Amino acid sequence: MGNERWYRWYGASQAIASMLLVNGYWLLFNLPVLLLALGLIFPSSPRQFLFSLIGLIISFPSILLPATFALFGVMRRWLYYQEPRQAIGGTFWRLYRENYRRSVAAGLFFGSLALLLLGSFRQIDSFQLPLLAVGYLFLSIILLLWLLYFICDSVHLAAPLRTALIKSFFIIFWAPFQTLMLLGMLSGLALLIVLIHPLLAGLIVGGLGSQCACYSYLRIIQKAQAKAAPADE
């Protein structure tokens, strides 16, 4: 009984350490993004604010998305293959290189949509048109879910870019329960950032967020495979 409890504690501590490590790699690769974000939040001059804003726009497809693809790829291997949580650095770097071109293309696509949505939102008065503001919020959530499911699909299957974009969009509405569950988990992570220090939350929020998204996506894939099995027979 004592040995069993010790093994459980050891397994839990190893999982936490692996989560912190892979999240640390993600933060390390996104260090330029973090510095630009600080410059945008605490600018010393209007020129620095503009420089940080342009830098963040450029770094979204070229730095943030490639590192996020690698993070999701590691999480997917842990959840789908139940791989030992070892050699995280080598796996992260390999997935980063393998998915770089696709992640940059995805970053340009989703970044353009986000800028278009933000630009349109700034043209309205949210106080005079509250329903329209709610509509923009809904579209922003849909865009975020679309991006998350696209990343999950890209690291899970080697589908063409256009096919993956279309499929990941319809997954949002094909499995509403899993999508709502993912939204609930992401909302919980956002609350975690508010309740504890942002620096402490940053040590785990990337890993936990990617794990939630990958788990939700894999549940949807398993559900679709289970429905397709009787038809094949």
Image: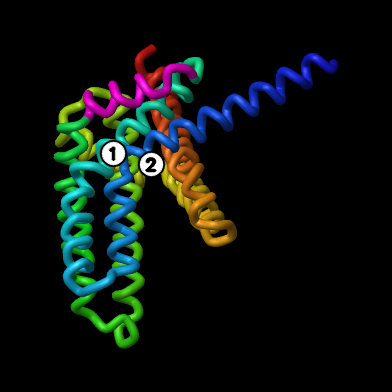
Q: Pick the residue in front: 177 or 144.
A: 144
Residue at the image position 22 percent from the left and 55 percent from the top: 56
Q: Percent from the top left, x then y, of residue 109? A: 16, 47
Quadrant including the N terminus: top right
Task: Report the disc number at residue 42.
Answer: none
Q: Pick the residue in front: 118 or 218.
A: 118
Magenta segment: does it hold 226?
Answer: no
- Label 2, secondary structure: give it: helix
The amino acid pointed to by label 2 is Leu
Q: Residues within 10 Å of mark 1 (few under 14, many from 20)?
A: many
Residue at the image position 21 percent from the left and 64 percent from the top: 117
Q: Percent from the top left, x then y, of residue 131? A: 34, 77
Does the CB distance between marks 1 and 2 fall below 8 Å?
no
Residue at the image position 21 percent from the left and 48 percent from the top: 59
Quadrant including the C terminus: top left
Q: Nearer the viewer, mark 1 or mark 2?
A: 2
What colour scheme has been applied to the protein in the rendered image? Answer: rainbow
Badge 2 is on which residue? Answer: 27
Badge 1 is on which residue? Answer: 150
Magenta stretch secondary structure, dominant: helix
Q: Residues within 10 Å of mark 2 (few under 14, many from 20)?
A: some
Residue 101, quarter of picture: top left
The amino acid pointed to by label 1 is Phe
From what the image shows, is residue 192 above or below residue 223? below
Say left or right for 181 vs 63. right
Q: Which residues are magenta?
A: 86-99
